Image (tube, rainbow, N blue to C red):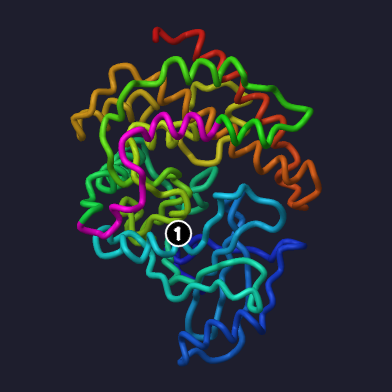
Amino acid sequence: MKNATEQLIDRPGSVRQGEELDVAKVDAFVKAHLAELRGTPEIRQFAGGASNLTYLLRYPDRDLILRRPPFGHKAQSAHDMLREARIMTALKPAYRYVPKVIARCDDPTVMAADFYVMERINGIILRQNLPTGLNLGAEEIRQLCLNVVDRMIELHQVDYQAAGLASLGKGEGYVRRQVEGWIDRYRKAKTVDVGDFEPVMAWLQDKMPAQDVATCLIHNDFRFDNVVLDPANPFEVIGVLDWEMATLGDPLMDLGNTLAYWVQADDDALFQQVRRQPTHLPGMLTRQDVIEYYGSKTGYRVDNFDFYALYGLFRLAVIVQQIYYRYFHGQTRNPAFAGFGHISRYLEKRCLRLMAASKL
C-alpha cells in the first residue's frame, strides 16, 4: 500500500482522444539515447496545461516526461519545444529547479512535431485545490506561498550572462515589444463571438512606462501549477516546469503575468470559477501582498502596479483566445476549451474595471 506522501504526487490520466502518440516510434527514439531502458513504455497524459501537451512515459524501471506542441494550428512563434529544451539545458547549472533534458527531436519521421524528453520530478503540483491528504493551516499556507514567490525572485537574480543565455532576449524595450506583440496576436486570434479589447489595448499603449525597470531572466508563466513541491516537505520547491516562454525581460512584467492567475478569496464568483490554483486559501498572500513582498525583496518600485497588472490580464486573455481560436475552428477536440470564449469576454470586463479604478 502506498504511503501518505506517495498519494500526494501529481499523477497523469488517460491520453485524450486525438492526442495519441506512436508508441513504437517514441520508444525507439528514447532508447537511442537511453540504451539501458527495457520494455515498452505505458503512455499517460497530464491534465494540466491548456497549450503544450505533457505525457508520462512509464518504463518498468524509469519514468520520463515528453513535451510536444498542441495538435492543430499554432501561432508562428509559439510552442517552440527545441528552444524550451535549450533554455532548460543552459539554465540547469544556475537554477537547480530545472528538470534535466534527456533528448530533443526534430525528426518528422518520429513525430510530426518537434518534442523533447526530460527527467520526471516526482512531487506535488498544486492545481485548483490542495490534493487530498495535504492539510495545511493558514500559517503553513503563508510560508508555502512565500517560498514559491522566493523561487521566482531567485530566478530573476540568476546571472543569465554566466549561464550563456545573453542571446535569449533583445534587451531594452521589452515592455513595448510585448504590448505591441500581444495586441497583434489578439487581433489575429479574435473570433466573431468575443470582444475586441480595443479600449484595453489603447490604454496599455498609452500607459506603458518609457523604460524597463531591469532586464533579467523571466519565466513568463510562473504559477503554482508549474511548481513541483517535495512530497515529504511540501514547503520546499524541488522543480519549476514549463519554460516555453522564458526570455530576458522586465521582471515586473513577469510578476504581472503571475498575478493574472492569482484568484484570491474576495474575488467575484466568475473569477472564482476559472481559478486553477489554491490562491484563495486562508493564509495565502493577496495580489497586493505579493506585490509589496516582491518589491521589498528586490528593491524594484512597485508603488503603482496597475499597468503590469492590466498587462498580465490582457496577455492571459490573448492566450485564452488563441486556444479558443483553435477550438472554434475545429483544430482541437479538447472539450475543456469549449468555454474559453466566455473566459475571454470575462477578462475583457475585468480589464475595463481595473482601468476605471486606476490612477495612472
Residues 150 and 253: in front is 253
**Place of residue 224 in the rendered image (x, y in percent of width and height, measured from the top left):** 44, 45
Which quarter of the rendering shows the C terminus?
A: top left
Residues 9 and 67: in front is 67
Position of residue 360 in the picture relative to residue 190 (left or right): left
Compared with 104, 71 (above or below) is above
Q: Residues within 10 Å of mark 1 (few under 14, many from 20)?
A: many
Residue 321 occupies quadrant: top right
Q: Is residue 84 visible?
A: yes
Residue at position x 43%, y 75% in the image: 102
Position of residue 340 in the picture relative to residue 51 (left or right): right
Q: Is residue 283 visible?
A: no
Residues 141 and 30: in front is 30
Q: Amino acid at mark 1?
A: Glu
Residue hosting label 1: 84
Residue at position x 43%, y 37% in the image: 258
Question: Does the stretch in magenta take in 21?
Answer: no
Residue at position x 68%, y 72% in the image: 21
**Place of residue 326 in the rendered image (x, y in percent of width and height, measured from the top left):** 73, 46
**Place of residue 10 in the rendered image (x, y in percent of width and height, measured from the top left):** 51, 60
Give the residues drawn in magenta, as a range: 162-182
Residue 136 occupies quadrant: top left
Position of residue 269 in the picture relative to residue 360 (left or right): right
Compared with 289, 122 (above or below) is below
Residue 344 occupies quadrant: top right
**Place of residue 128 in the rendered image (x, y in percent of width and height, measured from the top left):** 54, 43
SS state under label 1: helix
Count of numbered tags = 1
Residue at position x 54%, y 28% in the image: 314
Compared with 16, 171 (above or below) is above
Position of residue 99 in the picture relative to residue 202 (left or right): left
